[in-house]
Image (cartoon, grey):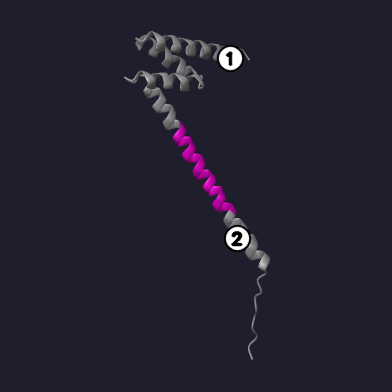
Amino acid sequence: MADKIIVVREESDDIAWKAVKIGAAVLAGVALVGGLGVLLAHDQMARHQRDLFSSQPLRRLAALGFLRNHPGVDNVLLLRDYLAWEDKPLLRKRASAVLAGMEQELAAAEGA
């Protein structure tokens, strides 16, 4: 009679392999959600920068509010262009206040 080899797999190996699969799936899901979040944030910033020159004053005001929380050299230059373009005194006043705050914040960050 021929000798038979019997392979016995331990149940703990199956559990470990399932844990690895679940961990990989979770990691892939987190990476996907993170990538989508970055794309949405980029789209949102581009939309608000476009709305800064919208024909609707309320959109321009909302864009100013958004830019207030995102100081940067590019946004300072954008606000300077906006101030030269804007004709409504209320929006010009708001934009100049946002610009002054941004310039102060950037100057403080540069000095630190």
Q: Which residue is mark 2?
A: 18
- Which residue is drawn at the image coordinates 47% and 23% (left, top)? 66
78 over 41 or under it: above or below? above
Specify whether residue 52 is in view.
Answer: no
Specify whether residue 50 is in view.
Answer: yes
13 over 49 or under it: above or below? below
The image's mark for residue 48 is: none
Point out the frontmost of discs 1 and 2.
2
Q: Quadrant of the C terminus?
A: top right
**What are the residue bounds of the magenta stretch?**
23-41
Residue type, numbered disc 1: Glu
Q: Quadrant of the N terminus?
A: bottom right
Left or right for 24, reference 46: right
Left or right for 1, reference 106: right
Q: Which residue is mark 1?
A: 110
Front residue of 90/37: it is 90
- Which residue is drawn at the image coordinates 58% and 14% (left, top)? 110
